[in-house]
């Protein structure tokens, strides 16, 4: 029988029909609990009657549409959140890259492009400012970490690629087993 209504169904004919459907659908209560709640409201319906109503008369298509729309909204919200996180990482990477380039330029101005002059300065006891070197290496590390975080969020990191490859392999094995009838001919 298609979803809808039956004149013989106690839940279909109950003034509490929408409550019963909401209890099970929204609150996740069991059929027995729904029957107990109905008894508290003065209606005697067995848990089998509740189950039969929900499996035979409840509008499954309408419920599927509602769940589809809800899942679509959740997916859109999750996608927007991921995009926001990626944009934040991009901003951090860009800031670190600008600072790293500025520090690299300052260090190049101190050391110069002449390797011979740099060695002479080092021989004279000249040492690059530690803070500048730490800032240069720190910003380079921040760029690297940001790029890795972005790869993970995009699913483009080595672990995600490996998981995708394993999933593809498993799908191929399952498809081959289904094609062969799933039986071993030993």
Image (cartoon, rainbow, N blue to C red):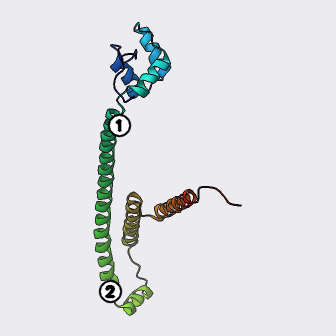
As helix, strand or loop, the secondary structure at mark 2 comes to loop
What residue is drawn where x is 29% and y is 50%? Answer: 80
Residue 76 visible, this orientation: yes
Camera-nearest residue between 179 and 64: 179
> Residue lying furthest front in this view?
1
> Residue lying furthest right in this view?
186
Picture quadrant of residue 72? top left
Estimate the spatial distance between the alpha carbons at disc 1 and disc 2, rounded to whole Å. Answer: 69 Å
Picture quadrant of residue 91? bottom left
Q: Which mark is residue 112?
A: 2
Give the x, y percent position of residue 29: 45, 24
Picture quadrant of residue 142? bottom left
Q: Is residue 171 left or right of residue 53?
A: right
What residue is drawn where x is 42% and y is 85%? Answer: 122
Give the x, y percent position of residue 61: 34, 35
As helix, strand or loop, the secondary structure at mark 1 comes to helix
Q: Please tell me how crowded label 2 is: few (under 14), some (14-19), or many (20+) other residues with Cα within 10 Å.
A: few
Residue 24 visible, this orientation: no
Camera-nearest residue between 130 and 151: 151
Camera-nearest residue between 145 and 154: 154
**What residue is shown with label 1?**
64
């Amino acid at each position: 029988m298609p979803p809808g209504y039956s004149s013989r169904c106690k839940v279909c004919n109950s003034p509490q029909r929408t409550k019963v459907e909401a209890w099970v659908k929204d609150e996740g209560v069991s059929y027995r609990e729904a029957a107990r709640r109905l008894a508290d409201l003065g209606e005697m319906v067995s848990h089998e009657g509740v189950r039969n109503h929900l499996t035979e008369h409840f509008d499954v298509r309408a419920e599927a549409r509602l769940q589809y729309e809800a899942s679509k909204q959740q997916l859109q919200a999750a996608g927007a959140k991921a995009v926001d996180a990626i944009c934040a990482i991009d901003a951090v990477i860009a800031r670190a890259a600008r600072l790293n380039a500025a520090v690299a330029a300052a260090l190049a101005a101190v050391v110069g492009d002449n390797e011979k002059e740099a060695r002479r300065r080092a021989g004279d006891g000249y040492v690059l400012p530690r803070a500048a070197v730490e800032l240069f290496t720190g910003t380079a590390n921040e760029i690297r970490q940001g790029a890795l975080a972005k790869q993970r969020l995009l699913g483009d990191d080595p672990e995600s690629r490996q998981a995708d490859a394993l999933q593809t392999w498993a799908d191929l094995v399952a498809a081959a087993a289904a094609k062969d009838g799933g039986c071993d001919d030993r």
